[in-house]
Amino acid sequence: MKASVESFRDARTVEQLLTEIRHLSPGRQIRIMHVCGTHENAICQFGFRDLFPDWLTIVAGPGCPVCVCPATDIDMAVRLATDRGAIVATFGDVVRVPARTTLLEAKATGGDCRVVYGIDDAVEIARREPGREVVFFAVGFETTSCTTAAALRRGVPDNFSVLCSHRLVPPALEALVAMPGQGVDGFILPGHVTTVMGIRDYRPLASRCQIPMAVAGFEPVDMLAAILALSRRAASRERPSDPIFNAYGRAVREDGNPVARRIMDETFERCDAAWRGIGTIPGSGHRLRGAYARQDAQRRFDMTPDESIRDTHPGCLCGEVLLGRVEPEDCPLFRSHCNPDMPLGPCMVALEGTCHARYRHGRPARGRS
Amino acid sequence: MDPRDVVTLGHGSGGKMTHALVRDVFMRRFSNPALVAMGDSAVLDAVGAKVAFTTDAFVVSPLFFTGGDIGKLAVCGTVNDLAVAGAVPLYLSAAFIVEEGLKIADLDLVAASMAEAATSAGVAIVAGDTKVVERGHGDGVFITTAGVGRMRQGAPEGPGSVRIGDAVVVSGPIGDHGAVIAAHRSGLALEGFGSDCGAVTGVVDAMYRAGIRPRFMRDPTRGGIATALAELAGQAGVSVAIREADLPVRDGVRTVCEILGLDPLYLACEGRVVAVVGADDAEAAASAMREVDGGEGARAIGEISAPTSGPVVLRTRYGGTRLYDRLASEQLPRIC
């Protein structure tokens, strides 16, 4: 296992791929967008932005599920913990996201919020504490919604429910492409999401918009192979027969994981959903369907979103950052007023948020310094 | 009540929140010349000789872990704070807050392990106190130790004495203790390594025996090596450039980090020293450390540079850079 991973981290292969990228001469600026927080994390972790040629810019799109989770949902989770006496269990990076307060602050003032690695840990808490209501605050894209579906299908105790804030990637890409002035020369498709869902959902968009797409994994060689393929296509303006290049073939299939797709279809129905800082995107959310609606925490506790809560701090450009329209450095609050110690916007909170990653990495996407 | 007005777990992370709490509450009330230096130990001139004095509280769950336990940790932690201040540790005190219901046999195991650690570090535990709190008001046992030591000739003069071009040396693989605790808490089985929990007196002695006078030393506990170096950078007004390729990280630690979404540079070490020495002394320091128990994996990992884009700048194995600063609060697992 280790040997197979190491081959995707090999420094010589990385250098070869970087050399091939540098040898392309597109004669113009190429802008490639990824839509996955783990990709942003990997790019920062490997320090790739220092190594790309000046003509190549990798920007982050709306790929951080924690960042796009609307403030109204965070607020409902906080109220469940503080006013309704529920145990609210969720992922580590969700507990610091600001709404009126954060879940971490709610915990310090007596709310019972617990960090878990996944829904199964939350179900376990519900089994251990049958006298308490346990709510799993389900944030994340298809990668995590399939685990929510699987846990619910396996059966959960009566005192367990889900505050469902899952989002889907393809509708967001559709919305993004439809916005004027995007100027994206290629999309890196998220490796985890496509492992579950496959490539087929992206085909209609790819053939319609004619923007090259490449599926990438998260090791350095995976990412560079995708970036090289996209740069080549963008540089030559060639129209290959297959507009989607799968650079993560060892995990991603055309149809994804059929079992996961099926149980997700049986557990969720699609709904219009709000994305923090962006607005409502049609068909981009998951809602519990049929018998599973019993486990819907919003219904169980009769919670209504408090629409008076602002998604972003005045002056915060997180919405524009999430769309890849501006760089974090373009925001007047970045660093000076908004930093990981005192985050004003959602992109500064999550480790995979563009602003947070950029703050820690310290270097803009473009060749500025 | 404003939630920002209460203590959160983040205040215990060793990162910026901890720093702010200490500054705004304790430093404001207790300020005096020995304390404001904010070293690992206070250096005192009051009893006719230079002595170092320090204290540390230990809360760890689980109490027993692969490679150590809370008792060993409590002795070594205070011994190490004295050692990195440039002192030869002499005497410790130990105070126990025991939770009702703890097995006496477990307490005895903890005490036995403290005795063994004290003997091997050459210190005596000469004072103590015991309190018992109601069930539910503690986590088995909390231990606070304090220690005094005699300052060496040529003890480090602190962050201000660090020069651009100086070398940074670490005494062994990083993140072992933090990885063991994280793995225990999440039920991961470990193979091939345990906590590095241990006294660093041996590796510090080895450096001095080799004639090396480190300008700065720290035991990178809570917050890991990234936090220790970022603090040094802030205090000394420099940046610290480190090389990923030279950074010793065990495969097992790397694996735990990848599974749990943690960064080894932020994981606690409990038996390591990071030292800043003159550039010409780097190899001699590392090889002196390698001669003694606990220093086998010592390496030069980087150097002090003029202030640049961040406090700690890591050159990745691919040639790019990654910045490190103190964490805002505790390191939390990522979503996927």
Image: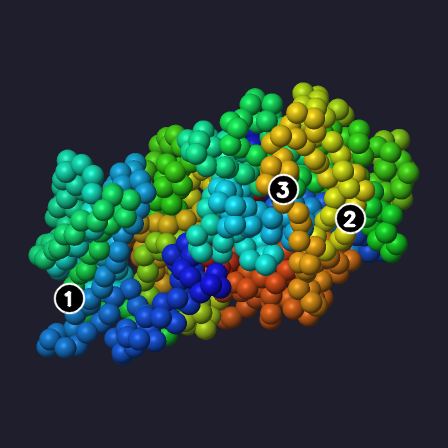
Q: How crowded is mark 2: few (under 14 residues within 10 Å), some or many (20 or more)?
A: some
Horizontal placement of A329 versus B10: left or right?
right
Element type at mark 1: strand
Q: Are marks 2 and 3 in contact (CB under 8 Å)?
A: no
In the rendered image of this protein, does residue A35 appear above or below residue A270?
below
Q: Distance between the residues labelled 2 and 3?
A: 22 Å
Which residue was labeled with disc 2? Answer: A280
Instruction: Tell me the subunit letter for badge 1.
Output: B
Using the image, tell me which numbered label, if any, was put on residue B150.
1
Q: Where is residue A186 in the image (x, y as percent from the top left)?
A: 80, 45
Horizontal placement of B32 versus A369: left or right?
left
The outermost residue toward the front is: A302
Lower position in the chain sequence, tag 2 or tag 3:
2
Which residue was labeled with disc 3? Answer: A302
Determine the residue positioned at 49% across, 64% down: B2
Please indicate, yes or no, whether residue B311 appears anywhere in the rendered image. yes
Tell me which amino acid carries mark 1.
Answer: Arg
Q: Distance between the residues labelled 1 and 3?
A: 66 Å
Tell me which amino acid carries mark 2.
Answer: Thr
